[in-house]
Image (tube, grey):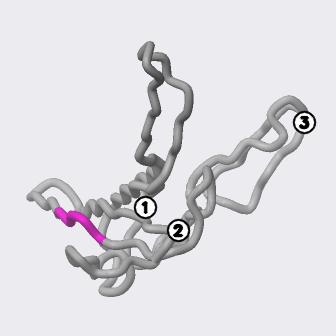
Amino acid sequence: MTVFAGMAASVITSSLAANVTFGATAETGIILSSFTRSVQGQKAELMDEDGDIVAVSTYGRTAKISISGAINGTTGIATASVGGLLTIANATTEFGVTGGKIIVDTVSSEQGSDKFRTISVEATQYPSM
């Protein structure tokens, strides 16, 4: 059994779950509530005269990134603007897409009389830029 302490939550695991991750990396300008990164690419298929696929090419890989949380400052994620570059602390090097530039696609915020002001950012990571 492994116990991790010194963070907001204690995580107790068995030896079968010794390498699990709990929580997310903090982001500048917000108190992070969620972070999602999805890698996708374009695909071309080559068919022979019988209509059987005989070759496949995957190209144009990108990663779609979604970040949301409570606004907590005037820098970092809190200053995101459509078309602008985004620098984030969470992982951007997994699943075949690494490096490049992250460009903001959409930004939305929400506030109300009974809630904290929040921000949601959607962006695309272009590894070849």
Residue at the (71%, 48%) spot, across then down:
10
Query: Which mark lies nearer to you, 3 or 2?
Result: 2
Q: Residue flagged by tag 2: what amino acid is it?
A: Ala
State the residue lying farthest toward the front. Answer: 49
- Whole-Å distance between the Cαs marked 1 and 2? 6 Å
Q: Quadrant of the C terminus?
A: bottom left
Q: Is residue 107 magenta?
A: yes
Q: Are marks 1 and 2 in contact (CB under 8 Å)?
A: yes
**Which x, y percent locates residue 8?**
61, 57
Quadrant of residue 106 in the image?
bottom left
- Whole-Å distance between the Cαs marked 3 and 2? 26 Å
**Which x, y percent locates residue 84?**
28, 81
Mark 2 surroundings within 10 Å by alpha-carbon count, few (fewer than 14), some (14 through 19), many (20 or more):
few
Q: Is residue 111 above or below residue 128?
A: above
Mark 1 surroundings within 10 Å by alpha-carbon count, few (fewer than 14), some (14 through 19), many (20 or more):
many
Which badge, 1 or 3, comes first in the chain's sequence?
Answer: 3
Which badge, 1 or 2, comes first in the chain's sequence?
Answer: 2
Q: Nearer the viewer, residue 32 or 102?
A: 102
> Range of the magenta residues?
104-108
For disc 3, the marked residue is 1
For disc 2, the marked residue is 26
Q: Residue flagged by tag 3: what amino acid is it?
A: Met
Q: Are marks 3 and 2 in contact (CB under 8 Å)?
A: no
**Which x, y percent locates residue 4?**
79, 51
**Which x, y percent locates residue 32?**
43, 61
- Whole-Å distance between the Cαs marked 1 and 3? 29 Å
For disc 1, the marked residue is 32
Q: Nearer the viewer, residue 41 or 81?
A: 41
Q: Main secondary structure of the magenta part?
A: strand
